[in-house]
Amino acid sequence: MKNVQKQKRANNSLPFFFRDEFKVSLVIILISVALLITTFTFDIVPPILNRGIQPATFPKALLVLIIVMTLLIYYLATKNPWKVEKKLPRSFFLTLSSFVIFVVVSKSLDFFLAISALSIFVSYCWGEKRLFYLLLVGIIFPIIVFIFFETILGLRFPPGIITNIYYS
Amino acid sequence: MDNLLLMLAPLFSSKLLLVLFFGTLFGLILGVLPGLGPTTGGALILPFTMTLDPLSAIVLLTSIYCAGTYGGAITAVLINTPGTPAAAATCLDGYPLAQKGEAGRALGMATVSSTVGGIFSVVILVFFAPILAQLAYEFGQPEYFALAIFGLTMLASIGEGSPIKNLIAGAFGILISTVGKDFMTSIDRFTFGINELTEGIGFIPVVVGLFAMSEMLTQSTLINQVFNRIALKAIKLPSKDDYKKTWKTILRSSGIGSFIGVLPAEGGTVASLIGYSEAKRFSKNPEEFGKGSIEGIAGAEAANNAATGGAMVPTLALGIPGSATTAVILTGLIIHGVRPGPDLFREQPDFLYGIFGAMLIANILFFIFGFFGAKIFARITLVPNKILWPMIFAVSVCGTYSLNQSIIDVWIMLFFGVLGFFMRRYGFSVVPVIIGLILGELVEGTLRQSLVIFDGNWLMFFTRPIALTFFILSLIALAFPLIRSRKFKKKL
């Protein structure tokens, strides 16, 4: 209980723009406003084809609802601040960056290679240093998955330096 | 009589029996592993079900649902970490009892009460789903719109996260469903010139991203966590004395769980918490709760497994998911071309009763597997995350890619993984997003068609008694968390 109070006090002591509730609400509102502006670019259907409401009306209403509810949670948070979240550890950022690496490698080099690279990278970053297990998660298991999808589900993976060798 | 025979059909099909066997086994493994569970597991297995016929696919998903819900109890009792959120209440008494050297007794009670709860709920499903479907014949577009709104407002009280945050997440889910060509006018919405988005955002990338990938990121923040695992010698069937103490609790919790399950969007987590608190309220020894009460385990476990059958009632009869996992099952039904609702009961009774029968058998199977194999399943928790999660990543990526053979789907999955992580970090549950995504088309479609019927007059909604009832229920659903928190504050 004391810890919770401490956390709350800590959050209250921060300037409002550093608090999680402000940052989260701001992000939601900014994205919602941007999307709301986008809805004004949607084509308008002539009355003869229009059934009930225009295609943009429903998303507009939803976005307004999201903005109103976000303002409400921010207002409630000013009375009852959110607890301060722990700082994210290095392993999180490494895992997150592995997603980016995956996207880059799968787009530019090879899909299978991207899976392998991410698996080895994540496993290593999470503390696995034994070579056999790194090979297991990075090579053996992806090969099993690849063959399973390829032969049983009849899936064709996107072209890349390794998959091209396999398919040729 | 015919329907009962249809329920027994899975017993006479070697293929379905095999699917049930593997589904139950897989469900147990998923339930035991903290962070996975039947919802994530169901999402991971969805692409694989495309190779199966619709009945086998749904039997696989439902058996994972039943067994996975029970599997969470094994981890809750032995390592004080619920394998699934629905097993959170089981930790409260399961772990203290295991610490006293009675892990076998705790798991025995969890297994028996889960099985009883599960079977009870299948009986409820068999009787109530057709009645609800019959009622749904009276529904027109306005009633379906009001029902969908009721389902969405129920998100306010799903137990995790604040009610408003859940509603924001639900609205966001509906918003995702509007991406792509408008289904009535073919106008592009939120496609930003990307061709792949004109077909809309698929269920699988969102579901796998929000559940599996966000969990992978969550696990990346917990790599130094150490679990204290209590050794299990063997599961013990409850003694006569235990049965005497708990039979009323098991029956009560089975009823509570089934009822909570039937309510749209609610699921095993809410059911187990209410089942547990009611068990405490009616107990002759409430002071034992939290210290290893056998009634506490029975109350929580019977309720969360009873919610499985209950949650299938609105899913099959109305197409409104009763829980997070049934949202995945509903996705499975949709991608297999099966549209749940009253027509399904009239046109495909063999399909429906096959599912009911399979759920019944799955409950018996997980009892057998749990009773004889809990010790082995408990060892699965020893698989380190640094090996398990990269493997799950490989399966998630290939599974997501396989459905449309689209690399964009994989990127969407990763995006929703990151989004889901931050949502959970700041107290937004990801379950409402899935339910919103599933109900989105129903909400918008029925709204627009109703407005055509009503000639644009919104007030006409309130002239339809069934629709009006659902709107009133929606208001109650919105007010309920407020009343509950005031009551709770008063108690304090």
Image: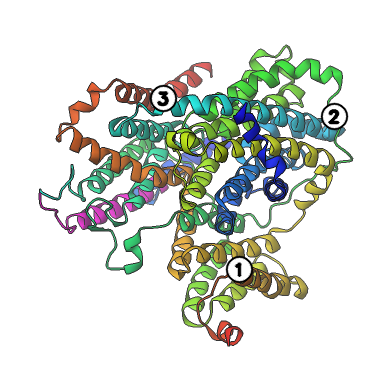
Q: Mark 1 sits on what residue?
A: A149
Residue B417 in the image: x percent, y percent? 49, 57
Report the side of B355 relative to B148 (left or right): right
Which sits earlier in the primary sequence, circle 2 or circle 3? 3
Indicate the amino acid at tag 1: Phe
Q: Is residue A31 magenta?
A: yes
Q: Is residue B88 magenta?
A: no
**B233 lies left or right of B380:** right
Disc ID at residue B237: 2
Give whichever of B242, B328 is nearer the camera: B328
Crowd class of label 1 (few under 14; some 14 to 19; many from 20; radius 10 Å): some
> What is the distance, in whole Å, between disc 2 and disc 3 at their CAs?
42 Å
Name the element at disc 1: helix
Residue at 45% x, 66% y: name it. Answer: B411
CA gap, disc 1 to disc 3?
Answer: 43 Å
* x 35%, y 50%: residue: B177
Look at the picture and state if A12 lies above or below A122.
above
Query: Bounds of the magenta span?
Result: A20-47
Q: Identify residue for label 3.
A: B135
* Labels 2 and 3 in the same subunit: yes
Q: Chain of mark 2?
A: B
Say if residue B218 shows up in the picture: no
Q: Nearer the viewer, residue A71 or B211?
A: B211
Quadrant where the N terminus of chain B sits is top right
SS for tag 2?
loop
For this rendering, which residue is in front, B35 or A25?
Answer: B35
Q: Residues within 10 Å of mark 2 (few under 14, many from 20)?
A: some
